[in-house]
Each structure stands twice: as structure tokens, then as C-alpha cells.
Image (cartoon, grey):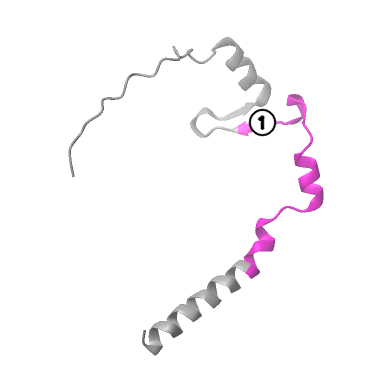
Amino acid sequence: MNRSSLLFCAASLAASILIAVLFFPMATLTWDELETSRQAQPAEEMGSIELGDFGSVTVLELVDYYIQNPPAASSGDAPARKVRFQGC
């Protein structure tokens, strides 16, 4: 390998490590946020969720809709996959 290729690889590796070190703290949760996320919350305290075209809907309304309109049950039998032998 020539010198410019090695220099480019080293600079790319250094830049990647620098970016990871600088931005990793922004992507992590604090200990308080982590402990709060491990505790279940009642649906009444969650508030509402923005669903785009459907507007703002509370979590209780979503649960109520799910109970009244359950998803279609699958038969459990997947269709047999056709095996094709095409050679090399």
C-alpha cells in the first residue's frame, strides 16, 4: 500500500473514534432516566400520543380500540415454500 492510502485509513479511523467519543454522551440515558424507564406506568398517566393523520389519541383509547378490534388470528400454518433448483 502506498503512503496516501495508509494516511487516509488512519485519518478515517481517528475521525470515527473522535466522533464516537464526542457524541456518545448525547446518546446515553442518565441513571435517573434509566431507572424510570424500568418501572411500569399506569395507562392513565401516559397522556396522549400524536398519530399523525389520526390526531392526538390517549393510551386508554388505543387499548380500548385494541380490545374491541383484535387483530385477525393467524391459522398458524405457513404456506409451503416452493424449492427451486437452478444450478450454479
Tell me if residue 36 is in the magenta stretch.
yes
Instruction: Give the magenta part as a residue range.
Output: 21-49
Where does residue 26 sit, x and y in percent of width and height? Answer: 67, 60
Q: Nearer the viewer, residue 22 or 5?
A: 5
Q: Nearer the viewer, residue 35 or 81?
A: 81
Asked which quadrant contains residue 84, the reply is: top left
Identify the residue position indicated by label 1 in the image.
Answer: 48
Left or right of 51 in this view: 1: left
Q: Name which residue lies at 58% across and 70% down.
A: 19
Q: Is residue 18 magenta?
A: no
Q: Residue placed farthest to the bottom in the image?
A: 3
State which quarter of the image contains the C terminus: top left
Q: In the rendered view, would you say 70 is above or below 59?
A: above
- Residue 36 x, y percent position in the rendering: 79, 41
Residue at coordinates 64% horizontally, 69% vertically from top-left? 21
Q: Which amino acid, mark 1? A: Ser
What is the crowding at mark 1: few (fewer than 14 residues within 10 Å), some, or many (at least 20)?
some
Q: Nearer the viewer, residue 67 or 61?
A: 67
**Quarter-of-image position of residue 15:** bottom right
Q: Position of residue 2 (x, y in %)?
A: 36, 87
- Left or right for 58, reference 11: right
Horizontally, is 71 left or right of 23 in the view? Answer: left
**Front residue of 31 and 43:** 31
Reply above or below: 52 against 14.
Answer: above
Above or below, 81 against 70 in this view is below
Quarter that holds the N terminus: bottom left
Residue 4 position in % (x across, y down) = 39, 87
